[in-house]
Image (spheres, grey):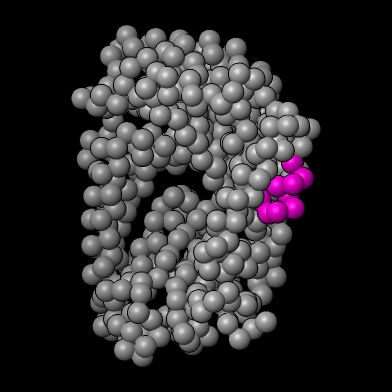
């Protein structure tokens, strides 16, 4: 696998930039990632996401229109620990970069435009809540992490959305949109001269638009919920259920959170996969018909996995899932051999997935800048994964799961 060439620069303010070279790609990608997301400290839950929306508002109108005028596409997203603004296009490179810095570095918050935005975000929340899985997920996250920012929906809740003001939004911006917490990334086919031009322009723009204020390391308190199991009233006939797995120390076994995440995803998929022996048994018992949704996440505030599915016998299938996850599997059993063989297949799949990412400049750029902010090295982790024996993989997962705690929630149409 060929690793792309990357040119990096760190400016006096602490702002960093990297240019990822992808020859023969005509599309260009530019982004700025902020080391601040929905789970991080903020006076009003959901402020990180509200900022993502409101930074598009400028005195002259929505800045998206200016990107469109030069044939560029612009978007943004908020995750647990990051917010990213990015654009793609073929021409007008200097203009795209200048607009991107204006987008991030020139806030325009007014009482009127905040009041106008709140119903839009409330509608976004309402759309999420229409999905039966949402209430199950919300119950699980609150159970694992209480009513903390990590335990709350990324967009916030109805109360917090209404609580956003010019003052607290400005405070969230000024506390987090600092040069030392931000990174610029460019990806595409750039000549040596273009690379140097981009880095010089970035240096000028970060001085022009970003507050040269030092970044203070805030103490991170890991929120802890009560891990209560919950039966929720169902709207309609949904039989959705979910389990949450809270890990006490994600890095206790391995030094890399990224590699730990990969191993746990492989392990959960192997044990619960629709192609596996366990799932076939559950299908024969008419406990499951469709595959389970599995996700593993690590954040500054806590590390966890979620498993969602649909079953008319939620309590029974939840018990079966907890059993397969917590009880040791006998060596050389049919289940053990399936997981071992699947591990070899999954290693090849992760390698193929990484190669596919290398051929999508947007995915590549986002992944590389996330790695940089998280102090991870995907290339190194992939090499470790490829050389890892099944026994090392299996024992590592067992150690991580040993310290974990599990909670669950499910919908019941008979509950008021």
Quarter of the picture holding the C terminus = bottom right
Q: Residue at x 29, y 37 (%)?
A: 360
Apparent side of residue 270 relative to residue 166 in the rendered image (left or right): left
Q: Nearer the viewer, residue 173 or 277?
A: 173
Q: Is residue 160 visible?
A: yes
Q: Report which quarter residue 126 is drawn in.
A: bottom right
Residue 163 part of the magenta-drawn span: yes
Q: Position of residue 273 (x, y in %)?
A: 33, 72
Residue 160 part of the magenta-drawn span: yes
Instruction: Reply above or below: 126 against 334.
Output: above
Residue that protrudes farthest toward the bottom in the picture: 285
Q: Position of residue 381 (x, y in %)?
A: 36, 47
**Magenta stretch bounds:** 156-164
User: Majority secondary structure of the magenta segment?
Assistant: helix
Q: Position of residue 358 (x, y in %)?
A: 28, 38
Q: Residue at x 61, y 18 (%)?
A: 60
Q: Position of residue 290 (x, y in %)?
A: 35, 74
Q: Residue at x 36, y 67 (%)?
A: 269
Quarter of the picture holding the N terminus = top left
């Amino acid at each position: 696998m060929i690793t792309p060439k990357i040119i990096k620069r760190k400016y006096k303010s602490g702002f960093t930039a990297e240019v990822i070279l992808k020859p023969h790609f005509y599309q260009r990608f530019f982004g700025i990632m902020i080391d601040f997301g929905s789970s991080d400290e903020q006076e009003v839950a959901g402020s990180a996401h509200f900022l993502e929306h409101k930074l598009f508002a400028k005195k002259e109108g929505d800045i998206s229109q200016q990107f469109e005028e030069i044939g560029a596409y612009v978007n943004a997203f908020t995750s647990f620990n990051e917010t990213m603004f990015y654009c793609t296009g073929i021409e007008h490179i200097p203009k795209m970069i200048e607009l991107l810095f204006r987008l991030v570095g020139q806030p325009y918050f007014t009482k009127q435009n905040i009041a106008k935005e709140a119903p839009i975000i409330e509608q976004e929340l309402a759309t999420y809540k229409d999905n039966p899985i949402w209430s199950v997920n919300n119950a699980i996250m609150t159970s694992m992490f209480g009513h903390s920012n990590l335990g709350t929906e990324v967009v916030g809740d109805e109360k917090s959305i209404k609580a956003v003001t010019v003052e607290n939004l400005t405070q969230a911006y000024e506390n987090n949109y600092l040069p030392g917490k931000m990174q610029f990334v460019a990806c595409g086919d750039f000549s040596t001269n273009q690379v140097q031009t981009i880095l010089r322009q970035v240096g000028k723009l970060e001085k022009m638009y970003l507050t040269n204020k030092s970044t203070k390391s805030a103490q991170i308190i890991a929120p802890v919920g009560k891990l209560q199991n919950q039966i929720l009233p169902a709207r309609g006939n949904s039989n959705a259920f979910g389990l949450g797995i809270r890990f006490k120390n994600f890095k206790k076994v391995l030094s890399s959170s990224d590699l730990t995440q990969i191993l746990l995803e492989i392990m959960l998929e192997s044990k619960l996969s629709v192609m596996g022996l366990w799932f076939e048994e559950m299908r024969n018992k008419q406990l499951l018909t469709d595959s389970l949704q599995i996700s593993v996440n690590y954040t500054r505030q806590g590390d966890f996995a979620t498993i969602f599915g649909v079953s008319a016998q939620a309590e029974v299938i939840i018990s079966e899932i907890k059993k397969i996850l917590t009880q040791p599997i006998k060596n050389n059993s049919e289940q053990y051999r399936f997981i071992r063989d699947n591990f070899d297949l999954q290693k090849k799949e992760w390698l193929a997935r990484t190669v596919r990412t290398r051929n999508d400049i947007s995915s590549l750029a986002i992944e590389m800048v996330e790695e940089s902010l998280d102090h991870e090295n995907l290339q190194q982790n992939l090499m470790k994964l490829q050389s890892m024996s099944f026994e090392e993989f299996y024992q590592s997962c067992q150690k991580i799961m040993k310290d974990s705690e599990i909670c669950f929630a499910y919908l019941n149409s008979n509950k008021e």
